Amino acid sequence: MNVADFAYLGIFLALLVCAALPLGRWLADILEARPPAMLRWLAPVERGLHRLCRIAPEQPMDWRAYAGALLAFHLMGFVVVLALQLLQARLPLNPAGFQAVPLGIAVNTAVSFVTNTNWQAYSGEASLSHLTQMAGLGVQNFLSAATGLAVMAALARGFGRQPTASLGNFWADLVRGTLYVLLPLSLLFAIVLMASGVPQSFERNATAVTLTGAEQVIPLGPAASQVAIKQLGTNGGGFFGVNSAHPFENPTPVSNFLQTLSLLLIPAACVFAYGRLSGARRHARVLFLVMLVFFVSSLGLSLWAELTPHPELGAAVAMEGKEVRFGVVPSVLWAGATTAASNGSVNAMHSSLSPIAGGAALFNMLLGEIIFGGVGSGVYGMVAMAVIAVFLAGLMVGRTPEYLGKKIESFEIRMAAIAVLAPCAAVLLGCAASFLTEGGRAAVGNGGPHALTEVLYAWASMCNNNGSAFGSLNATGPLYTWGGALAMLIGRFAVIVPVLALAGSLAAKKSTPPSTGTFPTDGPLFAFLLGGTIVLVAALSHLPALILGPVLEQLLMNAGHTF
C-alpha cells in the first residue's frame, strides 16, 4: 500500500463517521414526527398518503399489531412483484420484449426483494422489463429499507418509553422513513450518478459495431434511480447482471467511492438514531465503536491477504476478478463494506479474492450482518447480541441483568436467542442440503475447500439478507431458488418478529434506576464483553466450516495448491 491508498481509506472512514452523526440526529427527529424545516413542505404529501391509505398515525400498536401489519404489507408486496414478473410480456415499458420469468426464479426474486436481500438468480438487462425493474424491484428497495427503519424505531421505543403497550404505528413509521429519508437522499444521489455517466432512460437497447465487425447490444434503462436506492437502502440488487462491476452502474473512481460510502452511510447513522430514540446516546457510541473495530479489523486482514504476493505469481498482486478502473484497495474496501452491511452489491468478483479476504467477507455475514448491517436491521441485530451479553454479565455476578434500565428476563433472552440463532441454523442446514443432494453438488463450480466456501457463502448471504455470491455458483436450480427463498424469509422475519416481541415486552416494563450492582453498558468493559459475545456466537456456530473452507484453502495455497 502507498500513501494514496492510506489517504483513500482514511478519507472514507472520516467521512463515514462525520456524516453518520448529523444523519443519525435527522433520522431520530423524522421517526419521532419532527422532520427538519427544509423537508416540512412534504407534510401535506404525508397527510395525503395517510388519507389515501386510511392510516391513523396516532393510533398506537402493540407488538402483535405492529408485526401483523408488517407481515401483511410484505405479503402484498410479494404478490405485486411476482405478478409483474409473470405478466411482464403483456405489460408496457418492455421495449426488449422479455417474456414471463420462470416461476421458480420469479418467486425467488420476489422474496429476495421483499426481504431486502436482493439475491439475483437472474440478469436484469437480459430478463426483466423496465416496468418490472421500477415498479417491482425499485419500489421494494424503498419499502424494505423503510421497514428496517420502522423496526429499529419500535425497538428503541421499547427501551425509551415508560410502561406502555404501544410501539408506535407501523404505517406511519413506514411513510416517514420513505418520504423524508430514502426518497430525498436517493433523488440527490441519482442526480450525482447520472452526472457521472449512469444511464437513466426508457430508450431501446443500443446496438454498436465492434472493430471486428460484430454487433454488440448495449443495454439501457432507468438505472441511476435504482442504483441510488439499492446502495443507500442496503439492497444491492443490480440493474445489470454483474452489478456495480458494470461500467454503466459504476462508471468512474469517483462514483465508486461515493457508492462505497453510501453502502454504510444510513446503517451507521441508524446507530446514533437508536441512541437518541432510546435515550441512551453514550451506549449508542459504544455500539458504533464495536462495529467500527470489527469493520476495520476485517478490512485490514483482507487488505493484508490481497496485497501479499501470491505464491504462484511471484511478486505480482492478483488482479483477476477485479476492475482495472478501481484497483485492489477500492475493490477490497467495497467487499468489506457490502458484506458488513446487508447490501450485497459487488464491484469485483468475490470468488476471485484470496481465501482469507473471501473468508473475511464471509465472516462479516456469518456474524449476522450486525457490523453496521442493513438499514435498521444492523442495529436491532446488534441489540439482540447486547441483550445476550448483559445476560452473560448477569450470570457472572449472580443478579438479574438490566439493559438500558429494563430488567432482562427469560422471555427477552429467548427472543434475542431466536433472532441471533435462526439465521445461523438456516445457514448450516442449507449448506448441508447442498452437499447431500445431487442438484446442490452439481451447482458448485469449484473443487476442494473453495467449493465449501462457495456454498457456505451462498447460504450465509441468503440467510443474512445480503445477496452477494461467488460468481462460480449456479444458483438457478430448485434447491437455491425454492430453498433459498425459504432461507431469505427466515433470515428476515425470524429476526424481525422476535425483535418486535422483545420490544413489546420491554415497553411494558418499568425503568429501573441504576444502582451499585448495575452493569454499565456505556463503557469499555461492556464493549469488550459485547465483542467477545459476538465472536463466541460466530465461533460456536461456524468455526469448523471456516477452518475447512477459507483457512484450509489459504494454507494449501501457501503450499502451492490451488483450486
Image: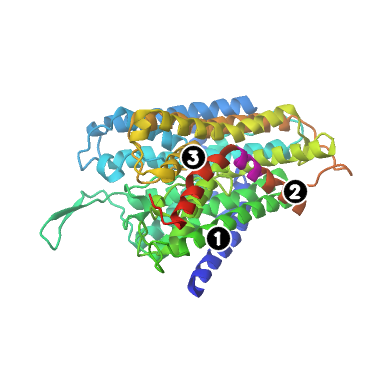
Residue shown at 56% from the left, 62% from the top: 13
Q: Does the magenta stretch include residue 539?
A: yes
Would you call the spot at circle 1 few (<14 residues within 10 Å), some (14-19), or many (20 or more)?
some
Label 3 environment density (alpha carbons within 10 Å; few <14, some 14–19, many ≥20)? many
Q: Compare marks 2 and 3 and give the one earlier in the sequence.
A: 3
Find the magenta span and give its range: 534-540
Q: Is residue 447 magenta?
A: no
| Disc on the earlier residue, 3 or 1 | 1
Q: Residue 300 carries which label?
A: 1
- The residue positioned 61% from the left and 42% from the top of the image is 539
In this rendering, the answer to whether 154 lies above or below 410 is: below
Mark 1 is on which residue type? Answer: Gly
Check disc 3 and give the amino acid type. Ala
Question: Callout 2: few (<14), some (14-19), or many (20+) C-alpha neighbours within 10 Å?
Answer: many
Q: Name the residue under label 2.
A: 526
Q: Where is residue 560 in the image (x, y as percent from the top left)?
A: 41, 57
Secondary element at image label 1: helix
| 560 displayed left or right of 158 | left
Q: How many marks?
A: 3
Residue 120 placement: quadrant? top left
Residue nearest the observer in this picture, 391 or 54: 391
Q: What element carries label 2?
A: helix
Outermost residue to the left: 213
Q: Could you say where residue 194 lies in the image, as x and y percent from the top left?
A: 35, 58
- Residue ID at (28%, 40%): 128
**Residue annotated with mark 3:** 460
Which mark is in front, 2 or 3? Answer: 3
Spatial CA distance of label 2 from label 1 is 24 Å
